[in-house]
Every structure is written in C-alpha cells, then in structure tokens.
Amino acid sequence: MKITKICCIGAGYVGGPTMAVIAKNNPHLKITVVDINQDRIDAWNDSDLSKLPIYEPGLADIVKETRNKNLFFSTNIDAAIDESEMIFISVNTPTKTYGKGKGMASDLKYIELCARNIAEVAKTDKIVVEKSTLPVRTAEAIKSILHNTGSDINFHILSNPEFLAEGTAVQDLLHPDRVLIGGESEAAIDSLVKIYNTWVPEAKILRTNLWSSELSKLTANAFLAQRVSSINAISELCELTGANINEVAKAIGMDSRIGPKFLQASIGFGGSCFQKDILNLVYIARSYNLNEVADYWEQVIIMNDHQKRRFSERLIKTLYDTVSGKKIGVLGWAFKKDTNDTRESAAIYVTDHLLNEQALLSVYDPKVSRVKIQSDLNYLNTRSEQENNDGVTVETCPYEALKNAHAVAIMTEWDEFKTYDWKKIYTDMKKPAFIFDGRNLLDKSEMKAIGFDYYAIGQ
Ligand code: UDX
Ligand code: ADP
C-alpha cells in the first residue's frame, strides 16, 4: 500500500518524539498527531518552543523544523483517521486501578476506544500500528474489533514497539539499536519498513510475528529493570561489608558478557514502563499458571520497592531517628535526568514516606512544576491535599530549597546539581549537614572535605 498520510493517536512521550523524527526523515509524508487532550495539543502547537508539553533534549529543534510543514498536531481525531493510510496507536496503557487484574494488568480501555474509533471512521483500507507497550495478544483484540465492523474494509495490524528511553529519546530514535515490526501481512510490514528505511539501515529492521514483537518489548524492559534491581540488591550488601558498589559495577561491567551499561546503583527505578511491564508479565505468567515464572519477575519489583523504602529509612535513622518538623531539601523530582516525566519516580515514594514521619520537604527540580509535584502526591491519596500543601514547598531556586535544611536528598541525577556551590549550601544548612545521594552523583571526598556527612548508595 502506498503511504502518503499518517496519523498517530496519542501525543505523549512516545507519540510526540517518534512522529517528529519520522516527519524529519520523510518530508513527503503528511503526519498528524492527534490527542483528546486539548491543552496538550495547544502546547505542541505553541509558538514558544519552551512550552512543548514534554521536555527532551533536541526535540524542540526537530519540531521547529517540521511543524506545520509535514507535521501537524490536532484534536480532530476523526479527520486524521479518515485521511490516513497508516494509523499508529500510541495512547497510555496504565496499570489497572480497579476490577480484575487491579494493580497488575494493563488497562486497555484507551486502546479499545481507539480501535472502535478507527472502525467507525475508516472508509478505506488501513494499516494500524500498535506503538504502545501492550500485553501479548492485544493485537488480537484490536484485530477482532476492526474485523467485525460489517464493512469490506481491510485492516492490517502491525506491532512496532518503541524502545526509546526518555531523556535520550531523540538520539535513540535517530540511531536505534533495532526497529522491530511484527505482523502477518508482508506487504503491510514492507510499507512500514520503507518509512524507517529512510534513516535506519535495513539490517537493523527486524521482522517477526505479532506475538514475538509484543513479548519482546515486555521482555526487554523486564531484563533492563532486572539489571537495576540486581545492582541495587548488591548495593545493600556493600553498605554493610565495606565494598563499594561503583567499584563492583565497574569490575563486573568489564566482563564483555555482562557489559557496562545499566549498572548504576540508585534509589530505585521509576518511569512509565518498567514497573508496568513487569507487572504485566507477572500477570500473564500467573494467568497461565506459571507461578515460578511469575514469582521470579515479581522479585524485581519487590527489590525496587525495598530500595526506595531503605533510602528513606536510612535517612530517618541517621537524623537521630526523627525527621518530625525538620526541613529536608529534595533535589530532583523527575524519574531520571533530562525529562520532565515523573511517572513512578522514586522521589514521590520517598517524599510520601518522609511526610508520614512529619518532615517538612522543600523540593527543587529544573523541569518539573509545583502543580505537577503536588498532583503526584495527591494522586497517592495518602493524606489530604491540604496536608500535602503544608508539608511540601516547591522552590524555583535550589539554594532556597536547601537553606536551613537538616539534610539534602538527591533523587534525580540532573547534571546541574554537580555544578552548585556546595560550600555555600553547607554554610546555609543546619549542622551537622547531611547529604543522602540517591544517585551517587556527587564526589564523596569533596563533600566530606567541605564538612558534609555524606551518604551514598552502596558505599
Ligand atoms: C525504558 C527503556 O530503557 C526503554 O527502552 C523503553 O522503551 C521504555 O522504558 P525509560 O523508562 O524512559 O526507558 O528510562 P531508562 O533509562 O530505562 O530508566 C528507567 C529507570 O531506571 C530510571 O528511573 C533510571 O534512573 C533507572 N536506572 C537506569 C537506574 O537506576 N540505574 C541504571 O543503571 C539505569
Ligand atoms: P506515553 O508515554 O506512552 O506516550 P502519555 O501518557 O505521555 O503516554 O501519552 C498518551 C496520550 O494518549 C495522552 O496525551 C492521552 O491524552 C492520549 N489518549 C488517550 N486515549 C486517547 C484516545 N482515545 N484518543 C486520543 N488520544 C488519547
């Protein structure tokens, strides 16, 4: 099928950057990214590029280059579906918060709504591309909805999971390790290969069946998360034995079979994918009565929750077993550097724990707004909005956030934290002044020389 127009449903952290990069490399394709959220679309269309709804290094330049030339953002979903030969579905698939599979399975209601929307609007044949991370065999459900419209329109379903990591999305999209396309129709796969092939070498484009493609995405995320939980598990042992986790990570990472990446001990992984995808895998395994398989992967989450909890407990214990009424400065709220995304960020859970102990938190993040921080805490439903407001202030200046604090907790590895005047911060803090470095970001000997009591992960 000749593709001239593409539509992407969902203008989020995946849909936005992915379509921008496709548009840049395919100037003759018209690409429309649609969303039900008017504010989000308005932000994508804002002439002030600093107002784009998601922060990603390099993204604003590509949007500037392509927007309103061959890349468009709109809330007119039906019109975009109608005119396009290929439709990407890139909507959110959060963990279910109700009913069967609550807390484990993915909520597919947004996917189903998209499929029904496409079925209703389509008047010509379409290739529908699954871009969201989904449980294995979701394509089957989409297919069933699309093939039961009673019309003679042909729908081809492809699974094309996205492997970009936030914070490096543009580079990941421009230079992917691989592009994975699962499907049943070779012709439909060919149409999508042609689009990627404008900048990705053919050898890096993998063709699989639908289910392999879906399962590969869940498995890749489970393996990556498992590496973080593995190094974090060893970090606890390091703290008791005198070994240093950075030295251990370097030593094992030089084994070419293990490799050096993704061995950074931390306060625990966050983000929209790792936890959700593993829970999904566990749920699927249990539904096939594979209890050993389910328990095996579930342990990755258990370890991650333990790591977050352990961090706040260590902080409280070190501050003489009480943080009640004490100001704690929090540096970083995003789940990793170079993104404004806060989904499942460890900062949220550590802050919640410290609020239970009546600490007074003062937060600074270079890219996350006060409104977002308060809404992340309110979403937990642990206490009233008023109590969250009273317990947490959000500063736009890091030095203000840390002034008169008893301790600093570093939650995100933003580069700018390393450049601060830590002598000044020390002078302005209560003594003894503590740093709890959840990212092993700062130089231990430098901080000790200034006078800080410095605690890192796995040291
Ligand atoms: C992940 C996958 O990397 C990506 O391929 C997939 O498409 C989506 O999920 P993302 O969640 O955006 O990407 O970021 P990632 O870099 O994987 O980091 C996830 C979390 O793990 C972050 O909280 C990060 O700080 C943490 N992490 C990562 C560590 O604690 N240590 C590490 O060594 C690496
Ligand atoms: P991701 O990180 O997977 O991109 P996001 O939550 O950032 O997830 O983005 C998903 C987007 O999908 C949101 O902006 C949401 O408004 C949009 N969305 C959800 N359901 C629909 C739908 N039925 N039609 C159009 N857009 C939708």
Image (spheres, helix red, strand yellow):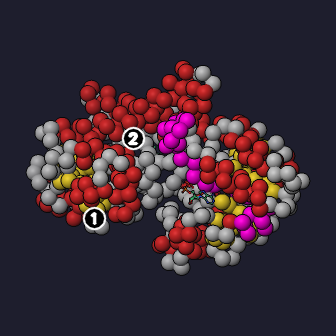
The crowd level at tag 1 (other Cα within 10 Å; few <14, some 14-19, many 20+) is some
Q: Nearer the viewer, mark 2 or mark 1?
A: 1
Circle 1 residue: 395
Which is more toward the observer, 368 or 246? Answer: 368
Q: Position of residue 81 (x, y in %)?
A: 74, 63
Mark 2 residue CB less than 8 A from any atom of ligand 1: yes
Which is more toward the observer, 254 or 298? Answer: 298
Q: Position of residue 351 (x, y in %)?
A: 29, 48
The image shows residue 421, relative to residue 113, as above or below, that is below
Question: What element does badge 2 sit on?
Answer: loop
Circle 2 residue: 268
Image quadrant in which the C terminus is located: top left
Q: Quadrant of ligand 2?
A: bottom right
Q: Position of residue 9 (x, y in %)?
A: 66, 60
Image mark count = 2
Q: Which residues are magenta?
A: 78-104
Picture disc at residue 109: none
Q: Position of residue 339 (x, y in %)?
A: 46, 58
Question: What element does badge 1 sit on?
Answer: loop
The crowd level at tag 2 (other Cα within 10 Å; few <14, some 14-19, many 20+) is many
Quadrant in the rendering for residue 453: top left
Q: Amino acid at mark 1?
A: Glu
At 44% from the left and 59% from the top, the residue drawn is 340
Which is more toward the observer, 103 or 325? Answer: 103
